[in-house]
Amino acid sequence: MEIMTLKQLKTTIAALEASGVGEDTPIFLDTGWDSIQELDPDALTVKQARPFQIQDVLTKEYYGGFVLEEKAHTKETTGDKQDVLVFDHKY
């Protein structure tokens, strides 16, 4: 999966504004369940993360992911830490 960058987010926001979406339009997160979840206005934060690989036990295929730096000890990371934007959305 391609990871959205800040540049792409800005382009998307500009396109949404051009289509008539107003500044007071609420933003929700589609969790894939039966409802959508509101986002806290302070949820978008800068954190540090590291990439890692995990192997599917059945297919033996490897899949990539990211883990926050403070939890990197729980995974075998495969790269340097990097700044990322995270919707820190916890109930």
Image (cartoon, grey):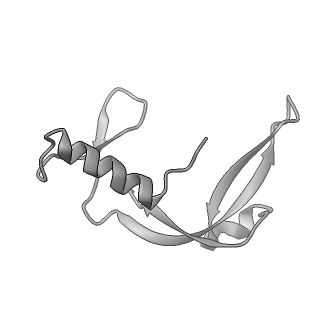
| Left or right: where 82 falls relative to 76 | left
- Residue 83's x, y, as percent? 55, 72
Which of these two is toward me, 6 or 48? 6
Q: Quadrant of the N terminus?
A: top right
- Residue ID at (88%, 35%): 60
In the shown orientation, is residue 86 left or right of residue 52?
left
Position of residue 32 relative to residue 81, above or below, is above
Q: Position of residue 34 (x, y in %)?
A: 35, 26
The answer to whether 40 appears left or right of 26 in the picture is: right
The residue at the point 85 percent across, 29 percent down is 58
Picture residue at 79% right of the left edge, 63% below the top: 78
* Direction top: furthest residue: 34
Q: Is residue 20 above or below residue 78?
A: above
Name the residue rendered at 26%, 51% in the picture: 14
Give the answer, above or below, for where 36 lies relative to 6.
above
User: Residue 9: where, in percent of width, then height?
Assistant: 38, 53
User: Is any part of residue 91 visible from this angle?
Assistant: no
In the figure, 57 relative to 42: above or below? above
Instruction: Count how many numbered circles sit on residues in the image.
Output: 0
Viewer can see residue 85? yes
| Residue 38 image position (x, y, % from top left) | 26, 46
Given residues 86 and 89, the one toward you in this image is 86
